Amino acid sequence: MKITDISGKIETLVDSLRDMSPTRVRSSFSDEHVSENDDERSSWIALHPSALDMFEQIMRDAEGKQIIMFLDYDGTLSLITEDHDRAYITDEMREVVKEVATYFKTAIISGRSTDKVQSFVKLTGIHYAGSHGMDIKGPTNTDQSNQEEVMFQPASDYLPMIDEVVNVLKEKTKSIPGATVEHNKFCLTVHFRRVDETGWAALAEQVRLVLIDYPKLRLTQGRKVLELRPSIKWDKGKALEFLLNSLGIAESKDVLPVYIGDDRTDEDAFKVLCERGQGLGIVVSKTIKETYASYSLQDPSQVKEFLERLVKWKKQTLGE
């Protein structure tokens, strides 16, 4: 979103925040989904069927191909939490991801900093692409000796600016209850999950003022977050392409990239797979949303089940 698009249009931005905000973590799937009727849900599922229901078909399509796994973190491997610093991956999910990485080249692509994601996941032998793919590392400390460490930081020149803007935004938003600013190295995230809706306009105004002062940054939106990023042509889709190239398999017809993610920012990766005509996007969502993904899963528990079935399938093909 350009500065000219948001200057003087705070009400529009707030409406956008309201429209794209997902439901909070709940023990049941109920009252916040009343706007969806059965016909709408059925139509959406027909376009984006459950990856669990279609698992056998997906595996038939994968026969003879090298599967490469790309996973988002928040909302995909971990639940979305009120406190973004406590979005921990479960031990069971970690073990499943570890098994996946044993059989398939695996990367985690997140809006968080690479260091933060690594501290949550605590696995070696996989690629990490933090800051929406602007900080790519890995794998390290792996038994697979033919893999070399990859490091790519296309926005490194922006680091001093990001460090400065984090402090500026923290100061500007400290009077807004519930607002927090997270430093994700090459981008910064303003969390408004704990901000009362009456405070959204004030928060959006402070973000607008910062964008005016720092025109080399651009605004993007995620699940109850506003994100300020360097104005470069780089996103999760570009990160996916870079990783395929770095693995030397970008042009191979025998490769099947699978990307699983829940956020608006994951759509860039889904779109890349659509444009390649090669690969599968799986969106994680309990609600109807526009998506480039081919398949869907409802929540991290279903992601875990899908990954478990994937590992089981691979073991069977290897006769283990």
Image (spheres, rainbow, N blue to C red):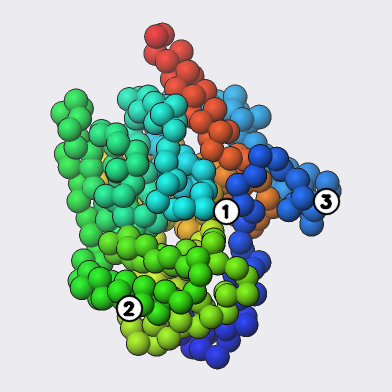
Q: Amino acid at mark 1?
A: Tyr
The circle drawn on residue 168 is: 2
Q: Can you give x and y, in whole percent of width and height, for residue 27 in the image?
A: 66, 39
The quarter of the picture where residue 133 lies is bottom left
Q: Residue at x 54, y 38 (%)?
A: 300
Residue at disc 2, secondary structure: helix
Query: Comparing marks 1 and 2, which lies closer to the viewer?
Result: 2
Q: Are marks 3 and 2 in contact (CB under 8 Å)?
A: no
Nearest the viewer among 48 and 122 is: 122
- Residue 129 is tagged as none
Mark 1 lies on residue: 292
Label 2 neighbour load within 10 Å: few <14, some 14-19, many 20+: few
The residue positioned farthest toward the bottom in the image shown: 8
- Give the residue type at disc 2: Val
Q: Which residue is mark 3?
A: 37
In the image, residue 202 lies at what x, y percent?
A: 53, 80
> In the structure shown, which secondary structural element does the residue marked by tag 3 occupy?
loop
Q: Earlier in the sequence, mark 3 or mark 1?
A: 3
